[in-house]
Amino acid sequence: MAAPKATAVPRAPKAREPAEELDMLVGEVRTTLLQNSHRVGATTVAALLDIVPGGRVRSATRPVAHAFSPDVRVGVHCPLATISGTRADGAGTAVARASVTGGTVLQASTRARLTRAAGERRLPWSHYVANPGIIEVAGRTDADDLAAGFLTTQTRASLDLGAVSSRLLSRVQRRPGIDRVTSLRARRTQLRFAVTWRSSDSAVLPQLLGAQRRISDFPSVPTGSAESFHRNSEPAASVSPVSVEFTIQDETLRTLRLRLGRCDPSDVVAACEDLALHDWLLSTVESLLDNSRIGVDSAQEVVRRFRPVIDHLLHLWMPGARVTEELAEVWAALERRPGFSREWSSLVGRIRDQLALAGLESSSSLSALARVAGVCQAGAEEDSVGA
Amino acid sequence: MPGSAVFRETSAVERTVEVPLAHLSVELGHFYPEDLAGGAGVLAEHFRRIAPWVDRPRLGSLAGGAGGAARAGRAPRVSTCLLVDDYSDQGKMPPPAAVVPQLLAAARAQDIVIDYIARESACAAAENVPLARIVEGALVADPPYGANGSRPTLNETGWLCNGARSPSTTGTRAMGVAEPWQPPTENGSRRHSVFLDVELWSEHRGHHAWSCAFLAAVWQLLRLGLLRAGGETVVRPVTVDPADLPDRWADFPSIGRLTPAPAPFCAYRTFSVLDTGYLPVEHAVRVILGQVGVDSAALSATERRAGAEGIALPPEPADRLSYFFLGR
Amino acid sequence: MIIFATSDKGGTGRSVTSCNVAYRRAMQGSDVCYLDFDFGSPTAGAIFGVEAAGQGTATGGGLHEYLAGRTAEVDQLDVWGQSELGGPRARPLGAGRLTLLPGDSGGGEFPVDATMARRCSDLFLRLDEEFELTLVDLSAGRSYATELVLRATADPALAEKTARWLVFHRWTRQHIVAAAGLVFGPHGILETGMDRGHRRRELEDTIRFVRTAVLEPDSPQLAVLRAEQSVWLQSYNTDLQKLAAKLRLGRSVMLGSIPLDPVLQWREQIIVEDDISTTRIANEETGQAFEDLAKRLTDDSAWEGL
């Protein structure tokens, strides 16, 4: 039986020459505060994340409580964004999961591997359903084109994994078991990632290096205000196993372009979730400090405003805690520049200064100060990455 | 790697158990209360008609073609089963003590062996495992072109189709452009569509009732050994003594084993011999199976183990089903 | 906290007052978002001076499209960054965020179904994660917008969220009668709310009234009136107060009173400090009334059950 032709589906442009191999990973993590008046215990977290009947919530208690839901599959059939404007269509399934860290921070990540479709025609859906997390790409385009397109030029019609993550966040936030009382207001952040693989025996390696130079010459940053941190773990001339390009696109969107040696995609997703968590901690604490009217109101008033940060967030800073050895290099590169832990230490320092001031303003609250300062101290000592 | 430590928490690791697998699971029929009310004559007629189609050499050809088992000169592992509908008209089905001996006798008269008898209500929920809910939760609806992840695809109405429905004309904004009627379309069709919309369940006075088609899809997945709950198996046949049968179907096992050492209940492929009246139901089963995201580990295990036996198994569950439909 | 702004009749100054209250509240340091649920005429962008969404947004990412399920996310426009309100396109020091979620240009009213109500409650929950105040400006009268938010707020997931209603009316006989009808009358907010799963008493406790374009008899603006006019005005004002009290719109449920200000009669705009102290096109009392109303939104003593 021949594969039936897709009706009402615009045909992807015909490839005139055999397309090169394609295997890459794209995804988006969204991070927010779990809507509950206090930290949520492990049993409740397990119930919150039990979103797939017959699935199994997985959890770890060390170094910080972390649990994630079974994978949810989502079918897609739509255009894929490319930076060159080359037409490309994707059909298949993405997989999403929700996770809770420290009983406090809720994340949802959606990911898909992009592979080359065997033919132009869309196959019966059962084919795609049997290959979860794989989206087959029809169209003459390559991995770098798709990666740059996915990270920076998404349109309303193109693949939107962030929307899947966002919907999953909302789904968990409205489940029973949490009271939906907010202890502090925090914005949802988005981390979009695209990963390609380097292997020394791969024929595509020279092209990958070439493409990387192109991106360096024309930064994939559309807005003038975006900050980009591009790190090669070693000089580009040698066959470097890891290259990391982390870009802050705007107040909530970050993009991460990785070129890695062969490793397990699920480990990469875990590393991206970990990075998104810490980026969210930085953004949230920073914006709270910025809006706490330091120097305008009394230090006690200021401290009252960021009290929830001390209670709920400071102890969550553990960069790289769930990252495998192969990917530790990604964290290490980001610690060199922009220097996540340096920035965190500086924020914690500002908090500590306000606490000290508040203590001076009111000697009666000295004991409280000592207690809270102790928390900050512990947070600062955990700054070091497993370097 | 020198000096590297491994730290693992068992609750953080994924695991999926494997199940014993036959080559072929043969379904000898699907019985409603009225089929059994007709007495021994009706049953005898049923087994007489299907007998030529379920003889062992024929079944061998379905089990995996010129596969390894045949080459090795061993008989393929084939198990037989049938389904008793104790779900749709609860209470109408005569008790096991009356039905099971009738079925066994009618089959024996045609030299047909019944290895397993299953209850349809067990496809809804078996031993506190909500099988139907698990399968419903694993549905990944076939997306029409344009589905980019921004909209939820699975609707909450309890229906599943094989394409795109005719767009609703309600919900357009005031003074907006009126849109003309458009036909439904089948995804991946050739020019013309065979559009099918399947009712998965209905809600009546607070009672959630699964449709026959949906439970039939669960039944096929059970037989293919592809269902798991939390990574654990959901198929645990229990030996039944034909001389000591319960009076209520609720006391009969979800899957009862009636022969001493049959081939496993689950199999690489299934074959169902059914009345032609089941054709639309099984069409629906295929539409549903084509949209169920089964446990990846369970699915790949079947392929791997079939491969080790020299059997090429199609990757998609729906392609592992074969049918024989009998007119009246 | 979610604040709904509604009115029975058009022309009450509901939208312009709501925008000004959102602006004041953000200036006071709160993170505020403003949702343009005036589906038949989404013009909040024009009031805020956000040109990209003067008559609704054209990107296809407005509230109409979101509620209809045609887009996953609603455009969030940073009012500070896209208008001159806070100075040269920047957030003023000490101010909170001020974010506009616009309607779609060319959008109209549309009937409501269960999935739309669900999307609406999802949106409220989501905005409440990051904003202290979600201000929703509804279409006037018995509208689909009002029906939609009554259904959305009846969602059990929103049970712990505080929702409050502001009903705007001008200080005239017809407006007082109409506002009372919108709240207490047949198919009014209370009756519809009960039908959608709210408890009448609790819902009623969340409703307050805001009088707009009010001429206080002792206002310096009236110094030019002839004696006869002044006497008539006094006596008619007393009549209106009696009527309002009789129709359950009395002072105890009045959250604010916005004086008549010529500038707002001619141009719907945000009144900034410069308009009062530098160019002096607006009255100080108007600014003060917005400021007070903004504070009272979250002042629980003004919202205690009666």
Image (cartoon, coloured by chain):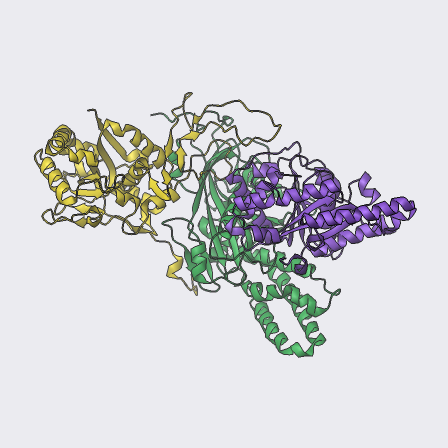
Instruction: Note whether B9 is above or below C75 in the view shown.
Output: below
B308 or C301, nearer to the observer: C301
Q: Colour of chain A?
A: green
Residue C46 sits in which quadrant?
A: top right
Residue C64 sits in which quadrant?
A: top right
* Horizontal and vertical percent position of residue B260: 12, 47
Instruction: Note whether A43 is above or below C120 in the view shown.
Output: below
Quarter in which the N terminus of chain A is drawn: top left
Describe residue C265's horizontal placement relative to residue B182 as left or right. right
* Horizontal and vertical percent position of residue B254: 23, 47
C150 or C24, nearer to the observer: C150
Q: Colour of chain B?
A: yellow
* Horizontal and vertical percent position of residue C164: 63, 51
Residue at screen point 41% across, 25% down: B189
Label count reads: 0
> Is residue A188 shown to the viewer in this render?
no
Residue at screen point 41% across, 50% down: A70
Furthest residue toward left: B109
C27 or C92, nearer to the observer: C27
Describe residue C181's horizontal placement relative to residue A192 as left or right. right
Q: Colour of chain C?
A: purple
